Amino acid sequence: MVVVCIDGGDPAYIRQGLRDGFIPNIERFMKQGFSAIADGTVPSFTCPNNMSIITGTPASRHGISGNFYLDVRTGEAVVMTGPELLRGDTILSQFADAGAKVVSITAKDKLRKQLGKNLDVSKGNISFSSECAGRCTLKENGIENVLELVGMAQPGMYSMELSLFVLEAGIKLLERDRPDLLYLSLTDYVQHKHAPEEPEARRFYLAIDRCFGRLEKLGAVVALTADHGMNDKSDAAGKPNVIWLQDVLDARFGKGDTRVICPITDAFVAHHGALGGFVRVWCTGKATPRQVIETIHGISGIESVMDKAGACRAFELPPDREADVVVISAAHVCIGASEAAHDLSGLAGHRLRTHGGVAEAKVPFILSEPLNDEYKLKAGVSTLKSYQVFEYALNGW
Ligand SMILES: [Zn+2]
């Protein structure tokens, strides 16, 4: 069983591929197996959704509700990638404990430790990232000499090869070791940079589709999903539609009274400038959550603004890591902190494409094999062919 998380794999890319005929393997899976549009976790970011996929639980249970949160005791923004922050166990480690051979490969190293939580790599299980492929050791990763095995050079952080390396490594390990369960998590560099109709996106989907076909040929059941979608968030002139929320709040309450955290942030932000569709506001001074909500409410481009309790209820989020106020933007708008704190030079003339809100929480859910009767009932697709459901969900009923 191979589960692939196509990072940033908005259903629009699949639709484009189906229309233009450059994803024949995915198309075959959709016809012979199962496909639907699924609801991802909100905030529609990488870490929360990868954790929901590998634990089968909402963020209220697994605890990873963003890529960053504010530790109110220290006032520090804490990156949420440590395995100690992930609550409970993963499906991967449970399978391994039950005797299955498990492989977990991710593009960026930030996810590796959580994906590999409690996975015993001394017993034939494997966990590594493309980012650090050249430095794998038996002790840390359960594998060494990965570059030789895969037959590719160490890929750059801003490249489609970072994702292709993950898939190629999965194929080589499936050939060599026949593991029972593989989780392959890609990176969304291409989707941040290129819309579905652009040639680079087409080239990427053509390449990953070929890999999916090879995985199936090797005998695997292939499951494809995504952590989140992606939306264009620039205006007609190509300028990003940004609400600089920290600047808005500072103008109203003064500096230091509120703290806006953009939980999309990691160390590699050149392709999105740390701008997303979901931000958190902590009230660190006199301003109350109600005053903050009243200030934000009605700003054009804001889809919703809610207090901690409302956000935790609506999106099944862990209250102890939630801010006082949660702000979500509409599909074609994003939210930043302070204009001066974001570096947009990395966009280098590209339109801003990013994610984080409810508008980017729809993801594909495709299996190379049909569902059994029990799951058919759960999915409620007894009368329509599953790929028809997918098309309808994209185009409206
Ligand atoms: Zn992602």
Image: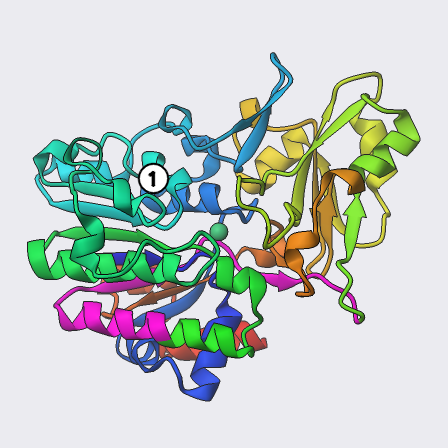
Residue that lies at the very extreme toward the top in this rendered image: 73
Asked where in the image residue 32 lies, by quadrant, the reply is bottom left
Up the image or down, 17 lies above or below 57; here it is below
Residue for badge 1: 112
Q: Which residues are magenta?
A: 207-236
Magenta-colored stretch includes residue 228: yes
Residue at 84% x, 16% y: name it. 286
Mark 1 residue's CB less than 8 Å from ligand 1:
no
**Amino acid type at mark 1:** Arg
Up the image or down, 300 lies above or below 207; here it is above
Quarter that holds the C terminus: bottom right
Up the image or down, 75 lies above or below 104; here it is above
Regarding residue 382, the answer to whether it shows in the image is no
Task: Give how far across and how far down residue 93 sits, in percent.
Answer: 21, 36
Q: Residues within 10 Å of mark 1 (few under 14, many from 20)?
A: many
Quarter that holds the N terminus: bottom left
Task: Give how far across and how far down residue 151 sits, in percent.
Answer: 21, 61
Under tag 1, what secondary structure?
helix
**Residue 47 vs residue 109: left or right?**
right
Task: Give how far across and how far down residue 317 sits, in percent.
Answer: 53, 34
